Amino acid sequence: MNLRWMEAVLPLGIIAGMLCVMGNAQYYIHKSAHGRPKHIGNDMWDVAMERRDKKLVEQASPSN
């Protein structure tokens, strides 16, 4: 009688554990594919600045 709460907690623990596993899997798959962690909340401005920075670095590299 005392362990009725275990019937509800066990499946919820399994679900929470699987959510953590899937989140970590997404992180490591993205990191291995792109070489760096995903930037959360990237908007158009951030994307434009990343392109600009990459272009500036590429232009500066051959001149060194």
Image (tube, grey):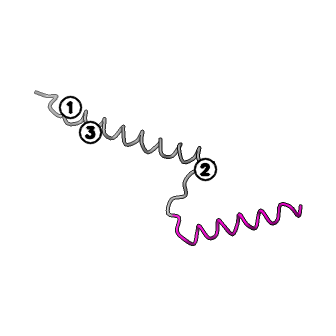
Choose the circle earlier in sequence order: 2 or 1: 1
Discs 2, 1 touching: Cβ within 8 Å: no
Q: Residue type at mark 2?
A: His
Res. 34 mark: 2
Q: Residue furthest right?
A: 64
Residue 47 is covered by the magenta coloring:
yes
Q: Comparing marks 1 and 3, which lies closer to the viewer? A: 3
Q: Position of residue 62 (x, y in %)?
A: 86, 61
Q: Position of residue 13 (x, y in %)?
A: 30, 36
| Residue at the spot of label 3 | 12
Looking at the image, residue 42 sits to the left or right of residue 19; the answer is: right
- The CA distance from mark 2 to mark 1 is 42 Å
Q: Which stretch appears magenta?
A: 42-64
Where 63 sits versus 20, above or below? Answer: below
Choose the circle earlier in sequence order: 2 or 3: 3
Is label 3 in a helix, a strand or a loop?
Answer: helix
Discs 1, 3 touching: Cβ within 8 Å: no
Q: Residues within 10 Å of mark 1 (few under 14, many from 20)?
A: few
Is most of the magenta stretch helix, strand or loop?
helix
Q: Residue type at mark 3?
A: Leu
Q: Residue type at mark 1?
A: Met
Residue at 42 percent of width and 39 percent of height: 21
